[in-house]
Image: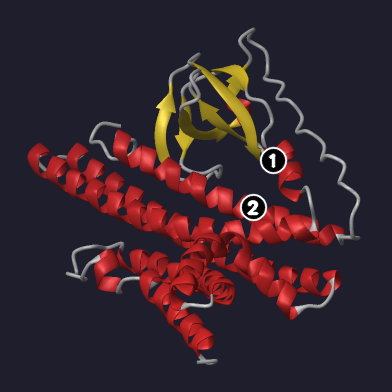
Amino acid sequence: MARQPNRMIAIATSAVLLAGCVTTRSDRIGADDGSDSCRQQVVALDSTGNFFAEDILRGAAFGAAGGAALGGIIGGNWRSALIGAAAGAATGAAGGYLAALQQRSADQSGIQASLVSDLSRENAELDRTQLAFNQLMDCRFQQAREVREAYRQGRLPRGTAEAEMTALRARTQRDIALARSIDQRIGTRGAEFETAIESVAPGTKASYEARRNATAVNALARAPVALKLRPEAGAPEIGRLAARQPVRIRPIAPGYALVQTQDGERLGYAEQSAFNSAGGRGVALPRQAEPRAQAAGPAVNSDTRTLAASNIARREGFSESVANAEMAASGGGGFELAG
């Protein structure tokens, strides 16, 4: 009977792992029928999700196992252990990773070193995922440009061009659904990191948000402005602003601003220099807020805070790029015959 708690932990852990197992590639992205010239980019994006799913499961399994053990100890029976497993699974994503760090390291410096190592690896995988998504979206928008150009030159009749664009939009929406599922895994994993980051470097996220969320200002487009999927010169165009169209903008990356409607609806990205203030002058965007003073606590290397903030920025950046692509695909930006 003394071995029952260990057996229960193993059962709970296995149950969580099985419940979270990812589907097969064909279930996620369908079979390759040879008709999609962006298939390689779809496969590349799909493959990046494996890392995040694996790590998320590991964190959730830790929470379930810990909860099962606690429930068994308190209740002294299998039913209590099952209740503990359910509670542990619910909280594992937010605390299991920190608890694992604390078990591996006896002091704060050891926890910090482990966190830095894990964040570095996480950031590298986030970069790989962002690049894969960017390349896939670039491929889709290029397909749309080719259909549009073939129609313009009379090589495709309107009915055929419309059918191809509809099919392309549907494929893009499936791509975005795949990216959204990866983003959800990244978010779950991010919750674990943020709990650990707050323990090691309190106030890091609040400081990052204060710098990141500069106040938007009212502006007018100086001339017709191309809206981009990402704050990069080579990013696909997803829409345009008319000359003197009123919008709200806020700095998002060097030389680029996030463009929104007056009601806060996201439109895309554009160069800051493309806008004037409502009075006709250049826009004076507000400076980003300075980081808040940190609460007293254990010494934290500034590089650790920078690495942690860059992890938050990468996660938010990927979520924003998925949201922008979703908006473009659903609203027709870049997937219409005229343009």
Q: Residue at x 87, y 47 (%)?
A: 295
Name the residue located 59 percent from the left edge and 17 percent from the top edge. Answer: 219
Q: Position of residue 228 (x, y in %)?
A: 47, 38
Which residue position holds label 2?
Answer: 312
Circle 2 packing at 10 Å, graded few (<14), some (14-19), many (20+), is: many
Q: In the image, is 143 to the left or to the right of 77?
A: left
| Image height of 291 relative to 27, above or below | above
Q: Earlier in the sequence, mark 1 or mark 2?
A: 1
The residue depicted at 74 percent of the width and 73 percent of the height is: 102
Crowd class of label 1 (few under 14; some 14 to 19; many from 20; radius 10 Å) = some
Q: In the rendered view, would you say 253 is above or below 338? A: below
Quadrant in the picture for residue 329: top left
Residue that badge 1 annotates: 209
- Amino acid type of the residue that numbered disc 2 sits on in the rendered structure: Ile
Res. 15 image quadrant:
bottom left
Give the left or right position of residue 306, taking residue 67 as reference: right
Judged from the image, the secondary structure of the residue bearing numbered disc 1 is helix
Q: Is residue 52 visible to the viewer in this orientation of the structure?
A: no
The C terminus lies in quadrant: top left
Q: CA distance from mark 1 to mark 2?
A: 9 Å
- The residue depicted at 85 percent of the width and 71 percent of the height is 109
Which sits in the foreground, 297 or 53? 297
Q: Where does residue 119 sit, x and y in percent of width and height?
A: 67, 66
Q: Is residue 27 left or right of residue 270?
A: left
Q: Which secondary structure lies at badge 2?
A: helix
Q: From the top left corner, tell me how far across and down residue 299 is, in percent.
A: 91, 60
Amino acid at circle 1? Glu
Q: Nearer the viewer, residue 104 or 184?
A: 104
On residue 38, which mark appears? none
Residue furthest to the top in view is 279
Asked if residue 71 can be seen in this view, the reply is yes
Residue 197 in percent (x, y) is at 72, 58
